[in-house]
Amino acid sequence: MTYWSWETFMDAFPIILAGLKITLGLTVVSYALALIVGFVWLVLESTPFRPFNFIIYWIREFIRSTPPIVQIFFLYFAWPMVPYIGTSFTPFVAAMLALGIHFSTYISEVYRSGIESVDKGQWEASTALNFSTRDKWTKIVLPQALPPTIPMLGNYLIILFKEVPLAATIGVVGILSLARSYGAQTWSYIEPLTIVAILFLLLSYPSALLIRKLENKMNRRFEKKQKKVKVVE
């Protein structure tokens, strides 16, 4: 029976910490991809051609309803076997594409909710003032639509960060992969896996507190805005 060993803990800590750069890097690039592709989903579903919108909607729903681990496996193992268009990806790129595209389906809904939160009168006012499409979006819509989405976007960043260890299943050498490797070599798993849990806690919990603070701030700003509207009325 193996018991807790602080010596093993201290020995494993710097080894596992070396993989934090890969874990954080995969989180950042996957999230950046999700932000971009999320906007693409929104644009594609806004086209006036209804059959095309229907196809895009169900593609997005299929991706959102499928587990990320299945998508990671598909891109890494199955996609290279697809005739004509299949190509091989490195483990890092396969994980980045799978996680980024998966979370983009959720982020597109965040964008949509932010845009729909803009009062109808603002759209009508920008049209009455003869604003161009670019000015309407950059000066009227986006400044009002983006702030309410910040807390939700932050929450998805934290969730994505906690899904990144799935990439270890295809060989991405992050903190979980190094912890498993250390445990296999020393037959001591409790210390390295505890280190992984501590690192995720130290990084995700403060981020969650910051997101909660931003959410409360946005709620207070929204309440003040509503009070001003009532006073004017």
Image (cartoon, rainbow, N blue to C red):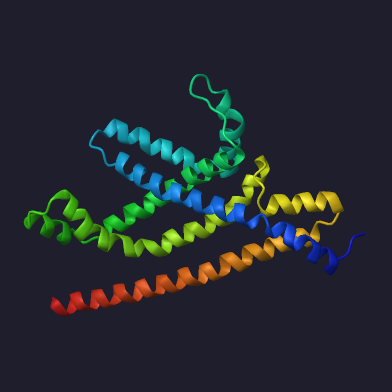
| Image-quadrant location for residue 135 | bottom left
Is residue 48 visible in this depiction of the protein? yes
x, y (%) of residue 111?
34, 53
Residue at the spot x=47%, y=38% of the render?
62
Above or below residue 19? Residue 232 is below
| Image-quadrant location for residue 128 | bottom left
- Who is closer to the viewer here, 169 or 60? 169
Residue at the spot x=42%, y=36% of the render?
59
- Who is closer to the viewer here, 197 or 27? 27
Taking the image as shown, residue 152 lies to the left or right of residue 134, namely: right
x, y (%) of residue 217?
38, 75
Above or below residue 198? Residue 128 is above
The N terminus appears in which quarter of the rendering? bottom right
Taking the image as shown, residue 233 lies to the left or right of residue 51, namely: left
x, y (%) of residue 41?
36, 42
- Who is closer to the viewer here, 20 or 151? 20
Taking the image as shown, residue 142 lies to the left or right of residue 110, namely: left
Residue at the spot x=13%, y=50% of the render?
132
The C terminus appears in which quarter of the rendering? bottom left
Residue at the spot x=22%, y=37% of the render?
48
| Image-quadrant location for residue 230 | bottom left
